Structures are given as C-alpha cells and as structure tokens.
C-alpha cells in the first residue's frame, strides 16, 4: 500500500501534456511523480527526465485501455502485450508506419527502468519487466564523416566581420574541438569556460555525468573574443537580463536546436560541401580524426563521454574504411595490380 503523504509531486510544468483519453489513475500519476523526482535528485539530464515522462505516458495510455489502475496488477504477460501493441501501433507523424526499432527500444527501456525503480523502492514485490525483451538494434557506422579538409572549409565558412558570424565561428570551433553533444552545448554557461586553464566543464552530460575537456589554443582565442566583445553586444538586447548562457542569439535569447540547424545549413552552403553537416557530424568526425592520429581509444571514450567502450569502437571501423581507401591508392602491390589490369584493358 502506498503512503500518499510520503509522495513528492513534481509540478505539472515540468512534465509534458498527458493525453486526456485513458487518463492514468491517481496512483499511477503519484508514482510517476516520485519516479521523475528521483531522476532529478540523482542528477539525470533534463532530456532524460522528459523522455521518461513520455515513455510512461505511452505505457499509462495502454494501461488505461486495459482498465489497469494499479502497478501491482501489471504482469509479465501484460508487458508482453504492451510490447506487441507498440510494434503494431501506427504513429501520427508518419501515418501508416509503425515505430522504428530504436523508438520501440526507447519506450520499452523506459518501462523497464521504471519497474526496476519500483522494485528497488519496495513499492512492488517483484519486477514484472525483468525478463521483458528489447528489440535488437544494429548500430552501424555513422552516416557522415567529414575529412579534415572538409572540416577546415566548414569552420572557415562564417564571416568574422559580422558579430553573428563570429559567434557561429566560435560555436563550430568549440563543437569540433570538444565533440560536445547538442544538448550539452545549449546548457553551457560562461562560467563553465576557463580561458586560463584552457578547459570547458560539461555539466550533467548524458547519463548525468560531468566531464572536463581540454581546449586548443585557437579555440580559446575565439572564445575569448566572443565572450569579451561579441556576447555583451547580444546580451544588451536581452529582455530578461543575462542568465549566463554561453551561446546566445542576436536578441540575447539562449541558443536552441532551430538556431543551430540554421547555423550549420548556412555554413555548409558557404563551404560548398556536398555532405550534410550537423553538430553530430562534427562529433563523429573529431572522434574519427583523433583515432586516425593515434589517440588511444580509451581516451576517446572519456573525451566523448561514452559509458561503454563498444560505442567508441564504432569509430575504429570508420577509420579502417578510410585506411582501406588510402591503402588501395598507395600500397605498391595494389598499384602494380591496378597497372596490370590497365594494361590488359588497353590490349583488348
């Protein structure tokens, strides 16, 4: 039995909208509030908390369809039915299409973690989701990796005579220098940058982990100019004052995904790159370039903030594919074979 007096309720503004149809019971809402508060206290990232709420909203919608109001009534069989329902569900955004394996994996993982927390908190006697199978996802090579020459063109694209261009240049330099994730970039404060020590402190990265990253001297130079001369001009236009966010728009508002997308589209067009470049592209590229230049994969794992080395090892495959191209072009035996083939072609 749940002691409602001991429950901590998360304010509604911190959670997304809950569907009116098949609205969850009071018990489920209270448990969700406790769970999200626990995630916040244990320093989960804001995006992770939002994702958990979204996962539970889907699950509670299914429970409502089955008239289940108590977590004690959730069984392994019911969870398997939920997994099947997710697989057959058609998304509204892509009418006629089912959820991708990655989306399905995310939804089920969220439910598994929720019940793991319930069991650990002794709210349920056992974990019915312990044996719930997740779809296997094949994580292939990154779709786009820029060469070092392509990165140079991209980073040289912004107009340094324009304040906005100088900010864009600084953003590109920092992303490539650190491999920082988009969500981590938006949360950076001016106080997180130590210009003297040439470091940037990433707070509450993926998995709620902090990490301290070194900065090249060139990047520090652009950051210094931006922080001391460019950013103050933007902050003057801010209506709500200076909240310390590192990268802001011309009107003083915090940078967001839309503005970052515009930045990369503009830079890619100016650089005349045929590849589609994003912040994630630069993250993939710097990881590949560091590996190509001899950095130990364990250091790259720490640099990128990967929890598992297997995630970082994907870049080893990327480097091998690049090595193969150079090998075929430069290896003496490969050159002799190609020459022999060319002679045969010409004599036919």
Image: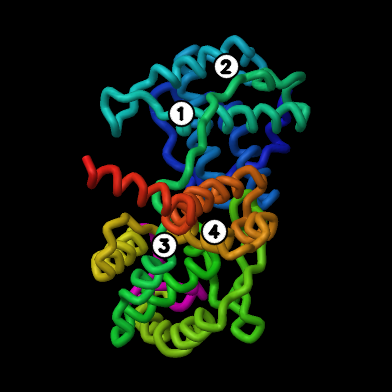
Where in the figure is residue 301, as x and y percent of width and height?
A: 65, 55
Crowding at mark 1 (Cα within 10 Å: few <14, some 14-19, many 20+)? some
Dot 3 corresponds to which residue?
Answer: 147
Residue 287's label in the rendered image is 4
N-terminal label among 3 and 4: 3
Q: In this orientation, which residue lies closer to the viewer: 61 or 158?
A: 158
Cβ–Cβ below 8 Å for labels 3 and 4?
Answer: no
Mark 2: few/some/many CA within 10 Å (<14, 14-19, 20+)? many
Q: Residues within 10 Å of mark 3 (few under 14, many from 20)?
A: some
Report how far apart the C-alphas of labels 2 and 1 lie in the structure.
17 Å
Are the residues at dot 4 and dot 1 in contact (C-beta closer than 8 Å)? no
Q: Which residue is mark 2?
A: 79
Give the Cα separation between the discs numbered 3 and 4: 12 Å
Q: Quadrant of residue 329?
A: bottom left
**Location of residue 134 (image quadrant):** top right
* Residue 233 image point, x, y percent: 37, 86
Query: Which contiguous range is marked in magenta?
Result: 241-257
Quadrant in the picture for the C terminus: top left
| Mark carried by residue 340 | none
In screen coordinates, is 311 left or right of 88? right
User: Which residue occupies 37% across, 66% down?
Assistant: 150
Furthest residue to the top? 77
Q: CA distance from mark 4 to mark 1?
A: 26 Å
Q: Give residue 306's position: percent from left, percent from top.
A: 63, 51
Q: Which mark is residue 101?
A: 1
Q: Secondary structure at mark 4?
A: helix
Does residue 11 appear in the picture of this structure? no
Could you tell which of marks 3 and 1 lies nearer the N-terminus?
1
């Amino acid at each position: 039995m749940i002691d409602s007096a001991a429950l901590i309720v998360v304010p509604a503004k911190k959670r997304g909208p809950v569907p009116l149809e098949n609205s969850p019971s009071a018990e489920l809402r209270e448990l969700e509030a406790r769970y999200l508060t626990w995630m916040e206290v244990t320093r989960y990232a804001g995006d992770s908390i939002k994702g958990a709420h979204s996962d539970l909203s889907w699950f509670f919608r299914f429970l409502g369809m089955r008239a289940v109001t108590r977590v004690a009534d959730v069984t392994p069989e019911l969870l398997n039915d939920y997994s099947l329902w997710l697989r057959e569900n058609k998304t509204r955004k892509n009418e006629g299409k089912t959820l991708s394996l990655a989306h399905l994996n995310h939804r089920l993982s969220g439910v598994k973690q929720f019940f793991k927390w319930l069991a650990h908190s002794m709210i349920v006697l056992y974990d019915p989701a312990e044996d719930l199978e997740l779809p296997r996802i094949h994580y292939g090579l990154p779709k786009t990796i820029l060469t070092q020459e392509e990165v140079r063109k991209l980073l040289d694209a912004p107009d340094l005579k324009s304040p906005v261009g100088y900010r864009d240049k600084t953003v590109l330099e920092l992303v490539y220098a650190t491999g920082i994730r988009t969500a981590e970039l938006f949360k950076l404060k001016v106080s997180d940058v130590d210009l003297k020590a040439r470091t940037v402190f990433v707070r509450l990265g993926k998995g709620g982990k902090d990490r301290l990253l070194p900065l090249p001297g060139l990047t520090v130079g652009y950051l210094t100019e931006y922080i001391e001369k460019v950013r103050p001009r933007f902050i003057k236009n801010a209506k709500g004052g200076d909240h310390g966010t590192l990268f802001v728009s011309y009107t003083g508002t915090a940078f967001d995904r839309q503005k970052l997308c515009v930045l990369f589209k503009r830079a890619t067009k100016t650089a005349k790159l045929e590849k589609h470049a994003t912040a994630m592209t630069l993250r993939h590229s710097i990881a590949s370039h560091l590996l190509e230049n001899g950095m130990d994969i364990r250091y790259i794992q720490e640099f990128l903030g990967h929890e598992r080395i297997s995630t970082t090892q994907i870049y080893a495959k990327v480097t091998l594919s690049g090595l193969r191209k150079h090998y075929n072009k430069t290896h003496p035996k490969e050159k002799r074979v190609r020459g022999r083939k060319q002679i045969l072609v010409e004599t036919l």
